[in-house]
Amino acid sequence: MLNVNELVFQRGEDGSLLSEEVTLETLPNKPTVKVKPLTRGKLMEVFQKSKSGSTQEKADADTEVILEGLVEPVLTAEQLKDIKPQFATAISMAILSVSLGISQDEVNKKTQEAIEAQEIDLKKN
């Protein structure tokens, strides 16, 4: 029988979600960062933005994942504008992995499948 601790993300005394150190598996030198999971509501919000037709909303969704989930190192919204793509992708994958309870490889595969599906749709139009 499942118990509540298995069903929900744990929170600290201040009410914020607990963070964890994760390895960025998609980067060659495997650096670590500290991230916290995104709530179900935040995941749904980000997913809706990422599925929109607007390039800006898709970029905003990726930035929002990092702003919400990255604990250390701390980046400002201004610094995120200049983040190198390989780091943005790796950090987003790590946050989604922790949030969804699946490996970073699996997140990467699902992301690639979604990108390929979008490319097919664009070619049809």
Image (cartoon, rainbow, N blue to C red):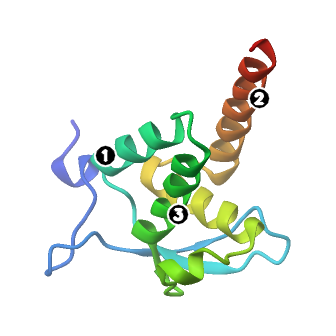
Q: Could you say whether the residue bearing mark 1 is in a helix, strand or loop?
A: helix
User: Viewed as shown, does residue 115 lie left or right of 14?
Assistant: right
Give above or below for 35 relative to 117: below
* Front residue (pair 26, 75): 75
Give above or below for 80 relative to 64: below
Furthest toward the right, the residue is 28
Q: Is label 1 in contact with label 3 (beta carbons under 8 Å)?
A: no
Q: Which amino acid does the dot numbered 3 rest on? A: Thr
Which residue is found at the position 82% from the left and 78% from the top? 29
Which residue is found at the position 39% from the left and 74% from the top? 19
The residue that mark 3 highlights is 63
Badge 2: residue crowd in 10 Å (few <14, some 14–19, many ≥20):
few
* Front residue (pair 41, 100): 41
Instruction: Name the quarter where the C terminus is drawn.
Output: top right
Cα distance, mark 1 to mark 3? 17 Å
The residue that mark 2 highlights is 116
Q: Using the image, tell me which numbered label, if any, was put on residue 40.
A: 1
How far across and how far down the image is residue 12, in percent? 20, 77
How far across and how far down the image is residue 65, in percent? 48, 60
Q: Which amino acid does the dot numbered 2 rest on? A: Glu
Give above or below for 60 relative to 115: below
Cα distance, mark 1 to mark 2? 25 Å
Q: Is label 1 in contact with label 2 (beta carbons under 8 Å)?
A: no
Tell me which corner region of the image, top left, top right, bottom left or bottom right, holds residue 38: bottom left
